[in-house]
């Protein structure tokens, strides 16, 4: 098969007619393959009427073979087209079903997550100033030396201090001096006391900071209330030449409550002499610098999380 064959199919044996005969011959039933079918008959009629007066010779009739051409305008079977359209329609329905199924799944999952959030909301932080750290139930992790006293050197506004020794005891009576405070620690179910001893760079001030772990804010408040010149944290002597004499002579004591913890201090001059007003100010400056940079920083983190950050 191919495009219409326009070659002349006449043979040499066919007698050649005169020019007049050819001029008067009726045009062949063949047509130009690029000319509309309807136009052929009307053109044939016009050519027949004008044949006698034609000034130019008519084209020689040419016999053509009938073959298929992509330019033919005849009717064609639409079976493949309908099959294709039907397949596309089925595919469209299938895809639409998948979309609906996936959307339904997403909606169901979203509803499940919403129900889960509604039925099991995230726990909120305990109320109050000390939040998680207000009670051992919400702050259950034991204290550690590293958590409270993370570095050996403490520097605040150019003032420098060195930690010389640490201690951790589970028998809280071993970390405190005085019958009243020991009784309060026991009734408050104290589980540990962690202590550390510091000295300033000049070697003129030294002291011990201790933290007692109690069951509740109420128990820590009780320990604070019994603090006095006779009931305080036991000074922890170091091994260096200065702090090895810690605890001898006169010193200043203090106890603070922080949630279910009791923060206790003992600070003194290097020679144990009673400090004057200027000396007292220097001692309390050292206490403030050291406790803010160590124990209170660690306990602040406990109020937010309720567990050890170390």
Image: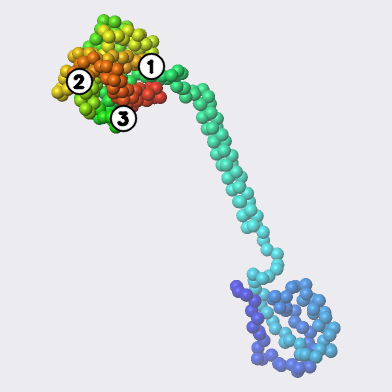
Between marks 3 and 2 in the image, the one whose residue lies nearer the viewer: 2
Which residue matches tag 1? Answer: 259
Which secondary structure, mark 1? loop
> Residue drawn at (40%, 16%), measured in percent from left and top?
134
Category of crowding for the residue at label 2, using alpha-carbon neighbours closer than 10 angstroms: few (below 14), some (14–19), many (at least 20) = many
Q: Residues within 10 Å of mark 1 (few under 14, many from 20)?
A: many
Q: What residue do we see at 21% from left, 23% from top?
A: 204
Q: Is residue 129 left or right of residue 13?
A: left
| Nearer-N-terminus badge (1/2) | 1
Q: Residue at x 60, y 74 (%)?
A: 2
Task: Classify residue 79 as left or right of residue 126.
Answer: right
Residue 217 point in image, percent of width and height: 38, 13
Residue under the image location 38 percent in, 16 percent down:
259
Q: Nearer the viewer, residue 101 or 216?
A: 216
Q: Is residue 48 visible?
A: yes
Would residue 102 appear left or right of 161 to someone viewing this image? right
Q: Position of residue 218 (x, y in %)?
A: 38, 10
Q: Which mark is residue 183?
A: none
Residue at mark 1 to residue at mark 2: CA–CA distance: 32 Å
Task: Select label 1 or label 2 by which is in front.
Answer: 2
From the top left corner, tell me how far across and down residue 129 is, in percent: 43, 19
Quadrant of image for the N terminus: bottom right
**Colouring mode (rainbow / by chain / secondary structure / one colour):** rainbow
Report the disc number at residue 270. 2
- Where, by quadrant of the figure, is residue 154 drawn? top left
Above/below status of 135 relative to 54: above
Q: Which residue is mark 3?
A: 156
- Seen from the viewer's position, the closer of residues 245 and 299 is 245
């Amino acid at each position: 098969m191919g495009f219409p064959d326009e070659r002349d199919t006449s043979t040499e044996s066919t007698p050649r007619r005169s020019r007049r005969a050819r001029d008067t011959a009726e045009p062949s039933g063949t047509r130009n393959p690029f000319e509309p079918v309807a136009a052929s008959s009307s053109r044939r009629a016009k050519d027949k009427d004008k044949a006698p007066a034609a000034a130019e010779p008519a084209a020689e009739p040419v016999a053509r073979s009938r073959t298929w051409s992509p330019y033919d305008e005849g009717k064609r079977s639409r079976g493949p087209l309908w099959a294709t359209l039907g397949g596309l329609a089925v595919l469209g329905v299938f895809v639409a079903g998948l979309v609906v199924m996936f959307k339904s799944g997403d909606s169901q999952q979203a509803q499940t997550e919403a129900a889960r959030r509604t039925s099991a909301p995230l726990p909120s932080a305990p109320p109050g100033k000390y939040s998680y750290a207000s009670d051992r139930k919400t702050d259950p992790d034991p204290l550690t030396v590293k958590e409270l006293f993370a570095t050996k050197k403490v520097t605040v506004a150019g003032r420098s201090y060195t930690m010389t020794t640490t201690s951790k005891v589970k028998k809280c009576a071993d970390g405190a001096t005085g019958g009243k405070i020991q009784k309060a620690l026991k009734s408050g179910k104290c589980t540990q006391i962690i202590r550390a001893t510091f000295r300033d760079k000049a070697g003129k001030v030294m002291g011990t900071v201790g933290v007692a772990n109690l069951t509740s804010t109420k128990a820590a408040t009780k320990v604070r209330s019994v603090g006095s010149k006779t009931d305080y944290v036991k000074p922890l002597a170091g091994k260096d030449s200065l702090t090895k004499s810690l605890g001898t002579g006169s010193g200043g004591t203090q106890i603070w409550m922080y949630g279910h913890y009791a923060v206790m201090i003992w600070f003194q001059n290097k020679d144990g002499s009673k400090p004057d007003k200027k000396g007292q100010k220097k001692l309390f400056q050292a206490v403030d610098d050291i406790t803010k940079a160590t124990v209170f920083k660690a306990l602040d983190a406990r109020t937010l999380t309720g567990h050890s950050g170390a």
